[in-house]
Amino acid sequence: MPINWNNELQTALSAQIPKIIQTGKYLYDRGWLYATSGNISSVVSSRDGVIAITESGTPKGSLTPENIIAIDRDMNVLKGTGKPSSETLLHIELVSSAGAGAVIHTHSVWSNAISAHFSDSDGIYLSGYEMLKALQGVNTHKHEEFIPLLENSQNMKEVSNKIHEMMKQKEGLHGFILRKHGLYTWGKDLNEGLRHLEALEYLLETEGRLLSFKDK
Ligand SMILES: [Zn+2]
């Protein structure tokens, strides 16, 4: 059924826009969203399945309110003039299958390097790090966090289907990497998503630097 845009949705969207802009600037400044890469989304209405997301092709360090669009579960644009990127499908899938309230996708150097290094592997385990406790539900450094490494593709429908299956099979995931492409993580809201992102980027960088020590 088509969604009727109303004041309630507009108020909820208006509340998300500055948070997404601020997050984009922060992530860009950290070097995790170079060029026009990555996307950030936040749920506007879980009842109506409405998501606010950065439009396709914009640098995330200098977003304006016009660069944030509202879409429904079928990727129809409900508010705004921009186009959703094809990767919006993955955000919609994660909101549905991971129960995410916000999804953050970066094209960071360390997620690319790690996924390229472990080219034969379908995932990596992170364990022993105090930083793991920044992930929701984790309360010890002894936790083993699995980060799936999925093959990249230009067919996001195919990737979205794989994520759907993966989320059914593996409980407790906090993120995954599309190989030589970037990291996806999520949280109950943007704050939690950002905390997960910082923790995972930190852990991936630490693992990556450790590999370079081992080569010497
Ligand atoms: Zn991407």
Image (cartoon, rainbow, N blue to C red):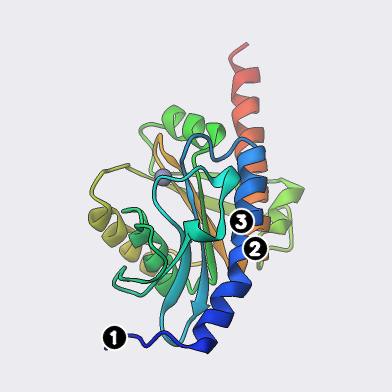
What residue is rendered at 48% in x and 82% in y? 46
Q: Which residue has dot 3 on it?
A: 21
Q: In this view, does 94 lie to the left or right of 60?
A: left
Q: Which amino acid does label 3 sit on?
A: Ile
Camera-side residue of 80 and 36? 80
Q: How far apart are marks 2 and 1 (CA)?
A: 27 Å
Camera-side residue of 112 and 82? 82
Q: What residue type is labelled 2?
A: Lys
Q: Which amino acid does label 1 sit on?
A: Pro
What residue is rendered at 59% in x and 45% in y? 62
Q: Which residue has dot 2 on it?
A: 19
Q: Which residue has dot 1 on it?
A: 2
Mark sitting earlier along the chain (1/3): 1
The answer to whether residue 103 shows anywhere in this view is yes
Q: Is mark 2 on a helix, strand or loop?
A: helix
Q: Where in the image, quadrant-wise, is ligand 1 located? A: top left
Q: Residue 2's spot in the image, x, y percent?
A: 29, 85
Q: Residues within 10 Å of mark 2 (few under 14, many from 20)?
A: few
What residue is rendered at 66% in x and 38% in y? 30
Q: In which quarter of the image is residue 195?
A: bottom right
**Contact check, label 2 and label 3, Cβ < 8 Å:** yes
Q: Residue 142's spot in the image, x, y percent?
A: 70, 53
Name the image quarter holding the N terminus.
Answer: bottom left
Q: Residue 128's spot in the image, x, y percent?
A: 70, 46
Above or below — where is 154 with respect to 6? above
Q: Is residue 190 left or right of residue 55?
A: right
